[in-house]
Amino acid sequence: MGVRWMPLRGVVAGVVALNLLGGSAMAATPAKAPKPQDVKAARTVIRALTHFDQSSLRHEGAMTAAARAMVAQVKAGCPGGIPASLANGTEKQQSVAFDVLFESAFDLTLNVNRPLAAATVSVSKRLAHVHFATRTLTRGIRQVAKLSGVLLKIKPSDLCADVKAAGANGFTADPPGTNRFLNSFARVIGDAATSPPNVLKKVKDLLTTRRDKTALKRLQQLSTREDKFSNKLGSKWARKLAAVLSPRSPGGGTGGFPTNPPPPATGALRRARVLSAFAAI
């Protein structure tokens, strides 16, 4: 089935930033001692991201409930909306179905992240006010701050309305709602993440004391735990969502359509893919 979980977590910085921070917490000390202002700023970044991860862990139950509620809503509103017969459909039909599936997967991400809205706003604001001694680092962390709040600008779509509209036209054209959603995704993601900053790699090198390295290691541990939960949650509920939207055919085949390789994307989805910094599909 084509629905795949997109592990964007509650705040994009929580993924992008911590991936950049990956590696040994005991990195080699830079040849030149960091400036006190840079060390202070780096510590603020670590505290902000740690606070977000701790908040994420406290909201695991609410995130699970949000996923369950979305699947129940789809089950009540548009079960079987993407028929298994599309496995033998035209290239255009498969492409339209793929766009709708992209919409459903991203909707799942948005709904699961709703419980983390307050934590997302908080980490975004804290990062936006960090000042390093150099303009390059400051600009970079500002971009991370902007990126961290990007998902809050995208509202979940009316998925079942779009699934029904696609079904009504025989999956020969993207429904207007799907087009709006994909264009909104492309615009917001493109504005915030044209070029992901590498500032956080440099932040790691500014943490040279034993206490700072311990704080970084703690952040990495929290991130690993949260990523594990997020991936498990997403995989489970993406499968459930897929089973509702496109159940197996009576003959026992898989629902939906072949996605290895996936069908060619329509214009809206192609733009979304190109602009996305997160490899969502």
Image: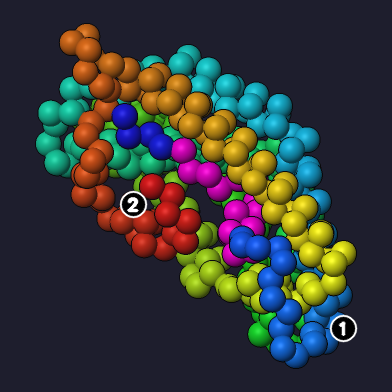
Q: Toward the viewer: 138 or 118?
A: 138
Q: Is residue 64 magenta?
A: no
Q: What's the mark number on residue 269?
A: 2
Residue 196: quadrant of the picture? bottom right
Residue for point 21% across, 49% down: 264
Quadrant that contains the N terminus: top left
- What is the magenta range? 5-21
Q: What whole-number distance in Å separates the C-alpha atoms at marks 2 and 1?
A: 46 Å
Task: Tell me if label 2 and label 1 are in contact, CB under 8 Å.
Answer: no
Q: Which mark is residue 65?
A: none
Which residue is at the front of the view, 184 or 8? 8
Outermost residue on the bottom side: it is 32
In this rendering, position of residue 92 left or right of residue 69: left
Q: Quadrant of residue 47?
A: bottom right
The reply, left or right, for residue 58 in relation to residue 70 is right
Q: Is residue 237 left or right of residue 37?
A: left
Q: Position of residue 83 (x, y in %)?
A: 25, 22
Q: Could you say which quadrant of the image residue 112 lies in?
A: top right
Sequence-wise, which precedes: disc 2 or disc 1?
Answer: 1
Image spot of residue 106 (x, y percent): 48, 41
Disc 1 residue type (three-letter) = Pro
Whole-percent x, y for residue 32 in the image: 75, 90
How crowded pointer 1 is (Cα within 10 Å; few <14, some 14-19, many 20+) is rated as: few
Q: Amino acid at mark 2?
A: Leu
| Residue placed under numbered mark 1 in the picture | 36
